[in-house]
Image (cartoon, rainbow, N blue to C red):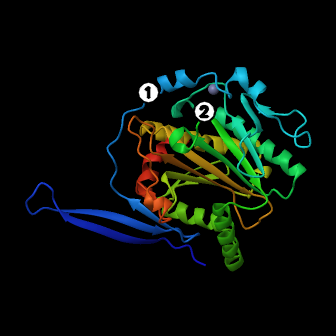
Amino acid sequence: MEIKFERFHLQSDSRSPLGGSEIISVPTEVRIDPLTKRRSRIITWALPPQDKFDFSRMIQESKKCIFCPENVLQKTPQFLNEISSEGRISVGEAIGFPNLYPAGTYGSVVVLCSDHFLNLNQLTSEIYEEALSVSVEIIRKTMGFDPDARFWQMSQNYLLPGGSSILHPHLQVIGDPIPTNEMGWLLDNSTSYYKENGTLYWNDLIQIEKGLGKRYISSIGKVHWFVSFAPIGFNEVCGSVEGHGSVTTLGQGEIASLAKGIVSTLKYYYEKNLNSFNFSIYSIVGETSYQLLIRIISRTPFQSNYLNDCTSFEVLQSELTANIIPEELCREIRPYFP
Ligand SMILES: [Zn+2]
């Protein structure tokens, strides 16, 4: 099984609306993901950039929320005694507890900090290091109680376009005995690759990307950061953690490296006037053919005339789109990484 970078060039031609004989040509690229074989459509035009949104009214209206320091220890649920006798799990300002509205077997929330709102450039690597440490501890403790819950995501939905109804920075930790679709695709294809080649897909991909130099961003410790050949979201940045398939084996060094990469990506998003994002860390215990992956994407920024970025392409055609050429994104984002 070879790692192939397949692409289709599509082009649309029309006569200029200004009249005359000028022909306007707009290219679109369809790329096939080398692992999952899923198609991504890269739209090469972009909507005009917006100014930074002023969140002050929203902050005023929503402050003293359930995640704010005066409420978080009073109004949030606590873990079962069998998982954590302390009820909640804290590291620094980060605090984790069960989700009152879970979407699976084990659903937790980790509040990142005491601040009710932070712009993307105010989220520091210390904040993420603490939040990820709490998340890892939740997973370790829960798996001590239920070892069958092998499939975990640590995900963040930031602001309303990202799917979060609460402004206060927080992330979700969700575990199940069965994988999500995405985890299933990643695992099945990584396993087939391993069986056929005897090597880890992710290590081979990283070596190839390093050699090509067009999409490899940087390595921070054991985390290799790169832009996907066939992204499944806007401004997608990925990180693969060498030597780990699950977050349960991570040391503090790898957690810090993940935190640094997240913050570097968010600083770039902030400079581009983006304010909403999602990330997922796909963590699978007990699979030697899989390597831990994080994927970060931006969402259409929150603004007065908000435009949803999921069109019929994404929700009905299962064809995910990206809005920047991956190689261009890699060039732009590299200076933000250490
Ligand atoms: Zn709050």
77 w.r.t. 278: above or below: above
Local crowd size for mark 2, using a 10 Å CA cut-off: few (<14), some (14–19), many (≥20): some
Ligand 1, image quadrant it occupies: top right
Q: Secondary structure at mark 1?
A: loop
Is residue 4 something one can see in this rendering?
A: yes
Which of 179/243 is in front?
Answer: 179
Residue displayed at 47% across by 36% down? 270
Q: Looking at the picture, which amino acid does disc 2 mark?
A: Thr
Q: CA distance from mark 1 to mark 2?
A: 21 Å
Residue 295 is left or right of residue 274, and the answer is right
Residue 199 in the image: x percent, y percent?
69, 71
Disc number placed over residue 54 in the picture, else none? 1
Local crowd size for mark 1, using a 10 Å CA cut-off: few (<14), some (14–19), many (≥20): few
Residue 175 in the image: x percent, y percent?
76, 52
Are dots 1 and 2 in contact, CB under 8 Å? no
Is residue 250 something one can see in this rendering?
A: no
Residue 64 in the image: x percent, y percent?
64, 21
143 w.r.t. 123: above or below: below
169 w.r.t. 227: above or below: above
Q: Quadrant of the N terminus?
A: bottom right
Q: Earlier in the sequence, mark 1 or mark 2?
A: 1
Image quarter of residue 85: top right
Q: Which residue is mark 2?
A: 124
Kindly tell me whether mark 1's CB lies below 8 Å from ligand 1: no
Image quarter of residue 192: bottom right
Q: Quadrant of the C terminus?
A: top right
Residue 216 is left or right of residue 324, and the answer is right
Q: Looking at the picture, which amino acid does disc 1 mark?
A: Asp
Nearer the observer: mark 1 or 2; the answer is: 1
Residue displayed at 9% across by 58% down? 19
